[in-house]
């Protein structure tokens, strides 16, 4: 634990305000501990003027089998190479404001699944061409009389069933088949053991056989938590509590990255024990704060951590909920 605290101290000492004209001069910051130690990559993904190309971000991150990094923003989905160069963009109304993404390799290609809270739908599109394959509006067949539908998370079962969380409204979680046919729903809003107070993020927890749903109950009182449900919507267990405001989850092997909106990223092991905390922001003026412009970013310190994803080498890509559009690459120290 002392080693972990030492790395955190180093991160605070080395934090430097990013210069728009000289981002490449900012020194990397080391964070984490043990096998979960990372170095930041200053200026990753910036344009030639040292600026973020994203605009406001309030979304997620995924990586395709070629190693390209997809992140969602208000303007759409921007795809980067591992060295931070833009390789393609999917812009416009169909791709804007994707709050959460999953990527899946299927028989006829790789596809992005997205939850669009502002547009009241789930979507599926081709990750290479952008062709829109499927849209999932509120399922009237459910019989529910909802005044609002604002999906925040999406994931896909091994058989292709699509699970879509209405995290910014009813907190029901809806299940569709691969063609978009409504199948069922479960959950409800509240602070009880089997209720959700903002079912904000969700993924397929492949650390278990059969895989489970791992759900971020972001605003559950007194502290945010993670939950396990089976793929039919049956409660299994409360995984961990006291996480602040967990926004999303990403799995690699036995490890889970959990962004916390307070400005940190927590890593859990197979036993769901915290093994590292990255980018911890203790400044109440800038943590959980969307309005931190790029010229006030601090290297190695997050502000509103919202999405994350692991690449094949164990590096992490982390997105902040941010007015200027922040996406960071953290390189795993071997």
Image (tube, rainbow, N blue to C red):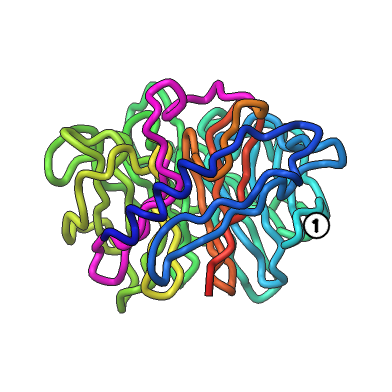
Q: Quarter-wise, where is residue 140 in the image?
A: top left
To which residue does mark 1 refer?
Answer: 129
Q: Residue at x 59, y 40 (%)?
A: 98
Q: Quarter-wise, where is residue 51 in the image?
A: top right
Q: Position of residue 300 (x, y in %)?
A: 53, 45
Q: Residue at x 38, y 47 (%)?
A: 174
Query: How busy is the neighbourhood of tag 1: few (under 14 within 10 Å), some, or many (20 plus)?
Result: few
Q: Position of residue 251 (x, y in %)?
A: 43, 65
Q: Residue at x 53, y 34 (%)?
A: 321
Of helix, strand and loop, which one carries label 1? loop
Residue 88 is covered by the magenta coloring: no
Magenta segment: 264-293
Q: Position of residue 167 (x, y in %)?
A: 38, 36
Towards the viewer: 255 or 18: 18
184 left or right, relative to 279: left
Q: Quadrant of the N terminus?
A: bottom left
Residue 122 seen in the current view? no
- Against 294, residue 108 (above or below) is below
- Against 133, residue 20 (above or below) is above
């Amino acid at each position: 634990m002392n080693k972990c605290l030492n790395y955190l101290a180093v991160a605070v000492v080395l934090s430097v305000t990013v210069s728009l004209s000289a981002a490449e001069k900012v020194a990397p910051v080391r964070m984490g501990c043990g096998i979960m130690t990372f170095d930041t990559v200053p200026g990753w993904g910036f344009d030639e003027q040292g600026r973020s190309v994203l605009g406001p971000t309030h979304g997620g991150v995924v990586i395709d089998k070629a190693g390209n990094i997809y992140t969602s923003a208000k303007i759409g989905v921007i795809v980067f190479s591992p060295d931070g160069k833009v390789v393609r963009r999917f812009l416009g109304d169909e791709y804007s404001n994707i709050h959460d993404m999953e990527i899946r390799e299927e028989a006829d290609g790789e596809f992005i699944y997205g939850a669009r809270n502002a547009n009241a739908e789930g979507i599926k599109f081709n990750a290479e061409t952008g062709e829109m394959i499927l849209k999932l509006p509120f399922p009237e067949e459910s019989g529910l009389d909802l005044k609002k539908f604002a999906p925040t998370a999406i994931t896909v079962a091994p058989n292709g069933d699509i699970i879509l969380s209405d995290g910014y409204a009813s907190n029901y979680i809806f299940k569709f088949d691969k063609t978009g046919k409504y199948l069922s729903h479960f959950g409800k809003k509240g602070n009880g053991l089997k209720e959700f107070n903002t079912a904000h993020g969700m993924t397929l927890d492949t650390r278990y056989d059969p895989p489970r749903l791992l759900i971020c109950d972001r605003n559950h009182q007194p502290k945010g938590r993670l939950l396990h449900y089976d793929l039919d919507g049956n409660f299994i267990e409360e995984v961990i509590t006291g996480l602040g405001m967990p926004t999303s989850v990403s799995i690699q092997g036995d490890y889970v990255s959990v962004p916390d909106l307070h400005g940190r990223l927590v890593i859990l092991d197979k036993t769901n024990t915290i093994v590292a905390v990255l980018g911890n922001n203790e400044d109440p003026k800038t943590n959980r704060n969307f309005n931190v412009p790029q010229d006030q970013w601090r290297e190695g310190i997050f502000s509103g951590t919202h999405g994350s994803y692991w690449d094949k080498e164990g590096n992490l890509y982390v997105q902040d909920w941010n007015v200027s559009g922040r996406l960071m690459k953290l390189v795993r120290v071997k």
